[in-house]
Each structure stands twice: as C-alpha cells, then as structure tokens.
Amino acid sequence: MEFAELIKTPRVDGVVLHRPFMPTVEGTLCLTGHHLILSSRQDNTEELWLLHSNIDSMEKRFVGSVGSIIVKCKDLRVIQLDIPGMEECLNIASSIEALSTLDSVSLMYPFFYRPMFEVIEDGWNSYLPQDAFKELESMTDEWRLSKVNKDFTVCPSYPPVVAVPKNIDDDTLKKVGAFRHGGRFPVLSYYHKKNGMVMMRAGQPLTGTNGRRCKEDEKLINATLRPGKRGYIIDTRTINVAQQAKARGGGFESEGNYPQWRRIHKAIDRYNVLQESLIKLVEACNDQSHSMDRWLSKLEASNWQTHIKEILTTACLAAQCIDREGASVLVHGTEGTDSTLQVSSLAQIILDPGCRTIKGFQGLVEREWLQAGHPFQQRCAQSAYSNSKPRQEAPAFLLFLDCVWQVLRQFPCSFEFNESFLVLLFEHAYASQFGTFLGSCAADRARLSLPEKTVSLWSWVNRPQELERLTNPLYEANSLVIWPSVAPQSLLLWEGLFLRWNRSSKCLDEAYDEMVHIIEYNKELQNKVNSLRRQLAQLETEDPLLDTP
C-alpha cells in the first residue's frame, strides 16, 4: 500500500495552529505518510511535527467556510487547526483518520525512521538476559539460564532465555508451562543480594474446578525455598475473582498442595477499569470550569489515586516479605502480564538501588516489561481520548510510571533520573520513532526483525547530551531499601504529566533552573573549602608552629 493513496490533500496554506499557553501560528500544513507538519515562514517560530500514530481522536467543526480540526493526542495534548476551505478541511480530516489508524505494524514510522544522531551504543544489545545473568552468577550458583523457550513454543510471551532454579530441567519446565496460564511458568524476577531471597513471577495455575495438580510445578517453586523456610504467593486478584477463575480453567495454588507457601490476595484492577479511570482523570484535568469541590470530587471519582495506592501497597508487601521476613515470593494474577509486572518491577525499585539509576531503570523496563511480555501493542493502542470502544487497552505501564514518580517525589535524592525521563517513557510507549515499544513480546520483535530494522530508544537516551537532560541534579547514591508511604495524603496527582498541557510551566521551569544554579554554586563552594583545607594542611606540615592554638 502506498501512503499517497490515503492523502487526499497533501498541503494547505493559511492554516492557523492553536495550542494552550503558546502564541497562535499561521503557516503551511503538510501531510506525509507518518507526520502532520505545520511550518511557518515567521522567524523563530517552532514547527509542529506530530506523528499520526500519536493521534488518539479528532473532532471537526465548521464556521462558514473555515473548518477546524481538534486533534487529541495520546500524549494528552489537545491542539486545534483552523483550515480555510471546507473541502480541504474534510480531506485533511479523512486523511489523518486513515493514517492514524493503520493496522499493519510494519507500516509504522520506526521502520522508516533514520536517525540524525550518531548511534554510540546500540540499545538493542544493551540489556540482554545473558548479561544480567552474569551479575547473578557472581552472587549465587543456584540458578541457570534455560533456552527451553528458544523457539517460543513453551510460552509465546516469554523471551527465548529465562532464569530458573539450577536443579530444574527443561522437561520439567515444559510440564509446568502446560500447567500455567499462557505457558508462563515461574521464572526469576529478582535476587536480593542482602539475604539471597528471590522474587519469581508467573501466570495463574490451571487448577480448574477439579483441583488439578502438577507435581513439577510444586517442585519448581519449592526449589527456591531454604530449608525450614516458608514463601509467600502474592495473588493480585481478590479471593472471589481467583475462585471464579476456576470455572474458566484457571485458579490458584491450594494450601494442601503448596504447604510451604502462604497465599495473600491483593486486589489490583485491570483492563477496562483502568482505561475508564484514565479517561475520567484526563477529563477532570482538562475541564477548567470546576469549582474546588467539583474538581476534587471528579478527581476522586476517577479512582486513579486508588489504583496507585493498591499497586504501591502490594509492591511494598512483596519487598517486605523479601527484605524483612527473609522469605521468597511468587507474584501472579491471571495472565501475569499486567498487575504482576507492576508489582515485581516496583518491588525492585524499593529494594534495589541499581534500579534507581538511569541505566538500571532502563534495564528494569527491558526485563520486567518488554522481555516479560507486557502487550504494549494492545495496551497502548488508545489513550484517554479515543472514541473507539476499549478492547484490550489499559494504562498499566503509565500507572507503573506514576507509582515510580510518587516514590521519586518522596525520595528526591535517591533517583539518578528526573521526572522528564518518566514522561519520555510514557510518550514513547504510546507513539515513537523508535522500535523499542513495538510488538507485545519477544516473539513479535523477533518476527518483525526490530533490532535489524529499527532504532532502539535506549540508543537515543544514552547519548551524553540526553543523559545530562534526564539526570536528577539532587541525586546522591543511596544503597538502602526505601519504603514509600502509601497514606492518601502522601500520594499526589502527577501534575508534570497530567497538567503539563493545561497550564504554563514557566514558574516551575524557573524554579528548577534556580535549584540547579544553587546546586552548582554549592559544589563550587565545596570545592573551594576542600582546596583551602588542603592548603592549610600543607602549611601545617611546612610550619609546625601553625599547629599551636
């Protein structure tokens, strides 16, 4: 298919662009296969380059012969284009609609994008499971890398290489795969250096109404326990939902078959509930006409902060079991691709200072979201403005990023990265020139040859000038476990993401610049103090009389 077939009017002059808190711009609107571009002939006027894949929905309005298109984006921006001529406006609207809803992944922009920057580090090779395992091997010899899933037949959503207990062979893994939802047998998610405890993740066991049993599954998860120790199974569903899953062939681990494990149910919502929550939250944030009472009531009605609290509470529980109870943990919900990953990745943010660095966090997203099979292609197909009926869309990854922001805000010196890094990941998960978030699992990425045909987001992020922009100036390495508060008054609305298009950031930007200036000045003064101390010490050694009071 040629993109030209979908573009009825490739160019229109005299188009006026309206954006909140920015001057209106008049210029020429051009449509390409992947971008909507508005260019002005005025000097020093920023051009608009908008990916069609970033467009969530569109509205058309007409006043006389001038048509307006209101474009609502997946990154939560809302812009208005005033287009002279009704026919041109209708043509542009139908072209944008066709180009922003292409089904074929291979027609997406990452396959056509050619970087204008020098690729110093190939992000596709930056966070391979083999490299992560080398670090694990230096700490313990109780685990091995299995290639049982090298052709994606045991578990379609797992990577080809996974870490499993050393004494569990591949035949056992295949039997356990047949007993777990989607073939997602328990795999290592995190090893706690302090006490050797581990966190695993999986899909639900397929016990069904007959209470089906799998000795190999029991053997696998028991292999992670120390003699005389118990483990915890954290099920991210309510007991009622887990019971109902039995009727559909799913279920949970019975205490009779898993006597060394204590099961804890924590309710974390999924799918449509989360999508509706995001829609309500963004609607509340965009409505400027509310009284204080109405705004707070709409914010509460969205339930967004409740979801944040549920996820953080469960992650804290998992971290507590590992660090304070000295117990290993298995996390699963139904599929093991949404709430499971939220909990396993946030627990690592709490426990592991390495995950709070820029590269460590990239590795965490790679391991616990991309390689772990979170279906980005489905979950991020729509954002908060889409008029289509939600199918498998859900802001699971955005909720995870929001939870990380909450912890970052409570521990502002413990994270090497700043808020901008989290916002950047949100934007690229929904629409990007990079191939990192395309597909829904490692099998998809292999089938699409993404490492060969597209550029990795990490190649862009890990350039020195970009790293500098994303670095937190307050960062001081903290090797301790950090315990966030989940009290309602501790959890705030993430204004830097949800309100960034609705109000001017001028004051915040100025405050940030002033903070950076103070930090730099403080460093200068510290260097001067150190220099003077060295000079004094030198003088004291040269003239002992200076040492007397």
Image (cartoon, rainbow, N blue to C red):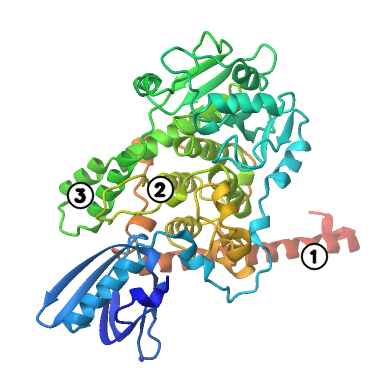
Residue 122 coordinates in the image, percent (x, y): 67, 62
Q: Are marks 2 and 3 in contact (CB under 8 Å)?
A: no
In the orientation shown, which residue stands out farthest toward the left? Answer: 64
| Vertical placement of residue 472 versus 214, above or below | below
- Amino acid of disc 2: Arg
Residue 124 coordinates in the image, percent (x, y): 64, 57
Near mark 3 (Cα within 10 A), the count class, few <14, some 14-19 or many ≥20, is some
Who's the residue at 36% across and 91% down the image?
Answer: 41
Near mark 1 (Cα within 10 A), the count class, few <14, some 14-19 or many ≥20, is few
Q: CA distance from mark 1 to mark 3?
A: 60 Å
Query: Which residue is at the front of the view, 536 or 30?
Result: 30
Which-is-in-front pick, marks 2 and 1? 2
| Vertical placement of residue 206 versus 546, above or below | above
The mark nearer the N terminus, 2 or 3, is 3
The mark nearer the N terminus, 1 or 3, is 3
Image quadrant where one finds the C terminus: bottom right
Who's the residue at 54% across and 23% down the image?
Answer: 179
Who's the residue at 40% across and 59% down the image?
Answer: 103
Q: CA distance from mark 2 to mark 1?
A: 61 Å
Query: Which residue position holds label 1?
Result: 535
- Amino acid of disc 1: Gln
Who's the residue at 84% across and 64% down the image?
Answer: 539
- Total numbered labels placed on residues in the image: 3
In the orientation shown, which residue stands out farthest toward the top? Answer: 256
Query: Which residue position holds label 2?
Result: 379
Query: Which residue position holds label 3?
Result: 295
Residue 543 coordinates in the image, percent (x, y): 89, 62
Image quadrant where one finds the N terminus: bottom left
Horizontal side, residue 101 vs residue 373: left or right: left
Secondary structure at badge 2 equals helix
